[in-house]
């Protein structure tokens, strides 16, 4: 048997879409227009411009005939085959790394379930619960009237959480004749890995649409696979909502890119609108943070509207697609108030209303229009916050206030003692983007082409925007054609959208590292467009005064091919080495704990502890929880803070009262939290609790002058001394090197009369 290292887990006609990969001399830069007089070289290169699906035009004056139909078909087929091969490569890589990291195929059932860490285990538990239900109807009923996830409460999980994907997969597994050939867990993880293939195909098509060459899509797919550390974390966090939703977001961006292309027929536009709606709906349905991503997207649309890059019809359509997707999810989630109270809905309503009322926005001179835009933006923001405030007051919505607390604390100058905000601020994933991320991206030749492309496109967009805003008569985007002989005043809307998408989400990634997975994938497509597209090469060669059809064709194909060869030579051996590195899942303490809970405790016993551990207990044992990692509920956040008092300096009577009030029968204490060293002082969980309680923190270091010493020792430490004050209320029932489990005794006789809380059902 191979030796494995033991590691403990840690945290197509032309107008329809794609174009053929035509020779460079048969194309010209028609849609990317940058508001300056054409150079003589450019005039010689192309005398007449016609929009093609690839984003280029056929230059009738060049004397080059277009590709024959059979060559177009061959080129299209080759591009699609390469897309499929790259997609399968990505799925194969993540599956192989997942298997080698855990030796997943050889794990017992409890070990496999433990490998679904933190909230991943919680989400997967509902897939398991649906499969174990006697029927689909009973399974859905149990989810709608759930009393196992939060003790003493009955909640609608389909309303509270985004778990429709687990429901859909469980139903599909029941209906398909695959039970004898494929285990449920493999059906689940293979579906998630297949979505990675969809993600690569979406990025591939986006780069192809932008550049007009499937060579750009190939480079995009290769970059995405080689930068796997920074583009996805699916191999060790399979059930995370982002792994379900981001492939649909990438598909939505592809549909938007196609929709914004010129000369689409009415039927093609309708098809693109429906594709945008379906992908937006799927994205929103699978991730609870959809509203914040769509808010950034709405700001991109708003910016393009202000710069007169998009037409009124395009802007309105994109806004309505977002609204339709959100409202559809709102209905499926049993009228989830968090969606109606989202900032993105308030912003879209405000933007459309102000736009309708301010009819003269796009008239006047440059300074007048800039003044109008400032006033317009101020009115939109004011109305947005007003609508959002009134909506949240009417709905009594407080589910997402912890996110705004986090944002406020992250960008505020002073520190905060809010427990929820600090819980996010102290996690590395919610910190600033580390420098080593950029170093890795530069090492794969991705960062520098992307930066250069963004700088050049940003300059072109700025020039085009100033040109649009300087038109005295203020015509809209629909009136741009034929504004002067030999003069260009338009900027390709699809390129403009993808440019701002990269810039906006890049800023989000730099501010919050976890958001980099939205940004880095799209970086690959934009960088590949810069390398393989004609527009930037025409500008570059014209600047060097060596623009020619032969040279353009040479560099447009030679440079990406040279980059692909370099990447293959440098990284293919490393990828093969990574895929051959064998490890093994090893967490005997957690396995022992789960086995003990399953065999030695009542089926309806209620467990209290850390959010991460309780998610695993729910999956492995099916016991009732007091709290869990899905943090989008005000009451749950307060309950979690109360449960975490077991790691604070509190009296045994105080902790006992808290646990009995929420119906806990057992409390699990973790040494890794009680004696935590992973975080710096001030960010350990016990420090966050001390700050929230107004107590001085442990260890050497400064403390705020208003903090006071606690009057009691730390509960998780003192309870292990087995003194009378603790043994009277708690009984140790299990312990190993990592965990200590205590049974919460029944109310004492002298206080039984004053108690109105029922004990947990046995």
Image: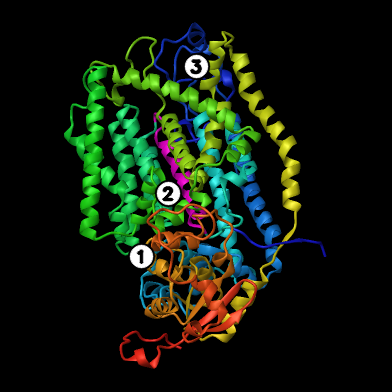
Q: Image quadrant for the N terminus?
A: bottom right
* Extreme-top residue of the structure: 40
Left or right side of 345 for 590? right
Residue at (31, 86) in percent of width and height: 756
Label number found at residue 167: none
Q: For the residue carrying disc 3, how many other residues have a C-alpha within 10 Å: few (<14), some (14-19), or many (20+)?
A: many
Mark 2 and mark 3 lie on one chain; the one further toward the N terminus is 3
Q: Position of residue 43 (x, y in %)?
A: 48, 9
Q: Nearer the viewer, residue 318 or 344?
A: 344
Q: Main secondary structure of the magenta part?
A: helix
Cα separation between marks 2 and 1: 20 Å
Instruction: Look at the image and give the residue range highlighted in magenta.
Output: 240-263
Residue named by callout 2: 279
123 to 470, vertically: above or below: below
Q: Quadrant of residue 295?
A: top left
Secondary structure at badge 2 equals helix
Residue named by callout 3: 59
Residue named by callout 1: 159
Secondary structure at badge 3 equals loop
């Amino acid at each position: 048997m191979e030796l494995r290292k033991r590691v403990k887990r840690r945290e197509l006609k032309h107008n329809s879409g794609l174009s053929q990969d035509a020779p460079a001399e048969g194309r010209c830069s028609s849609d990317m227009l940058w508001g300056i007089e054409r150079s003589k070289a450019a005039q010689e290169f192309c005398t007449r411009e016609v929009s093609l699906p690839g984003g280029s035009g056929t230059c009738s004056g060049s004397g080059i005939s277009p590709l024959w139909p059979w060559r177009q078909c061959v080129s299209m087929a080759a591009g699609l085959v390469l897309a499929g091969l790259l997609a399968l490569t990505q799925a194969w890589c993540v599956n192989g790394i997942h298997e080698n990291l855990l030796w997943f195929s050889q794990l017992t059932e409890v070990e496999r379930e433990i490998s679904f860490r933190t909230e991943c285990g919680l989400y997967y538990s509902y897939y398991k619960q649906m499969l174990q239900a006697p029927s689909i109807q009973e399974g859905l009923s149990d989810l709608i009237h759930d009393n196992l996830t939060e003790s003493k409460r009955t909640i609608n999980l389909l309303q509270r959480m985004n778990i429709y994907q687990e429901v859909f997969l469980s139903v599909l597994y029941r209906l398909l004749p695959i039970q004898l050939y494929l285990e449920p867990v493999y059906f689940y993880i293979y579906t998630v890995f297949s979505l990675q293939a969809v993600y690569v195909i979406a990025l591939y098509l986006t780069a192809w649409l932008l550049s007009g060459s499937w060579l750009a899509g190939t480079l995009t797919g290769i970059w995405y696979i080689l930068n796997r550390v920074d583009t996805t974390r699916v191999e060790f966090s399979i059930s995370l909502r982002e792994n379900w939703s981001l492939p649909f977001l990438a598909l939505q961006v592809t549909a938007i890119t196609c929709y914004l292309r010129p000369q689409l027929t009415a039927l093609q536009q309708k098809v693109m609108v429906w594709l945008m709606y379906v992908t937006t709906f799927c994205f929103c349905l699978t991730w609870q943070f959809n509203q914040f991503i769509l808010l950034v997207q709405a700001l991109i649309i708003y910016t393009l509207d202000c710069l007169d890059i998009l037409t009124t019809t395009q802007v309105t359509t994109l806004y309505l697609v977002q609204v339709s997707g959100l409202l559809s999810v709102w209905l499926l989630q049993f009228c989830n108030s968090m969606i109606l109270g989202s900032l993105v809905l308030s912003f879209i309503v405000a933007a459309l209303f102000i736009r309708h009322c301010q009819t003269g926005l796009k008239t006047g001179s440059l300074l007048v229009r800039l003044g109008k835009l400032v006033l317009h933006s101020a009115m939109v923001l004011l109305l947005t916050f007003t609508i959002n405030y009134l909506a949240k007051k009417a709905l009594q919505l407080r589910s997402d206030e912890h996110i705004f607390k986090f944002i406020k604390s992250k960008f505020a100058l002073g520190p905060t003692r809010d427990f929820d905000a600090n819980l996010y601020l102290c996690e590395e994933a919610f910190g600033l983007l580390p420098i080593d991320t950029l170093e890795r991206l530069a090492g794969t030749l991705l960062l520098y082409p992307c930066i250069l492309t963004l700088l050049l496109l940003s300059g072109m967009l700025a020039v085009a925007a100033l040109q649009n805003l300087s038109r005295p008569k203020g015509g809209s985007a629909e009136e741009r054609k034929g504004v002067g002989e030999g003069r260009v005043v338009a900027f390709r809307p699809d390129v403009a959208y993808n440019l701002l998408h990269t810039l906006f989400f890049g800023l989000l990634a730099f501010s919050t590292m976890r958001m980099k997975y939205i940004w880095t994938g799209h970086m690959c497509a934009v960088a590949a467009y810069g390398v393989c597209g004609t527009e930037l090469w025409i500008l570059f060669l014209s600047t060097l005064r060596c623009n020619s059809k032969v040279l353009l064709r040479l560099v447009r194909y030679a440079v990406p091919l040279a980059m692909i060869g370099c990447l293959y030579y440098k990284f293919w051996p490393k990828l093969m080495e990574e895929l051959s590195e064998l490890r093994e899942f090893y967490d005997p303490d957690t396995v022992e704990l789960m086995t003990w809970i399953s065999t030695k405790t009542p089926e309806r016993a209620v467990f209290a502890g850390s959010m991460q551990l309780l998610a695993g207990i729910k999956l492995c044992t099916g016991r009732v929880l007091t709290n869990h990692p899905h943090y989008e509920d005000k009451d749950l956040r307060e309950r979690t803070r109360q449960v975490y008092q077991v790691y604070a300096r509190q009296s045994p009577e105080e902790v006992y009262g808290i646990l009995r009030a929420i119906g806990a029968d057992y409390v699990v204490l973790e040494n890794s939290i009680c004696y935590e060293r992973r975080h710096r002082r001030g960010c350990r969980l016990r420090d966050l609790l001390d700050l929230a309680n107004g107590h001085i923190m442990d260890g050497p270091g400064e403390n705020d002058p208003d903090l006071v010493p606690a009057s009691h020792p730390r509960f998780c430490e003192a309870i292990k001394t087995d003194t009378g004050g603790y043994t009277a209320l708690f009984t140790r029932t299990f312990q190993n090197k990592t965990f200590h489990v205590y049974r919460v005794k029944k109310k004492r006789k002298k206080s039984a009369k004053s108690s109105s809380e029922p004990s947990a059902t046995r």
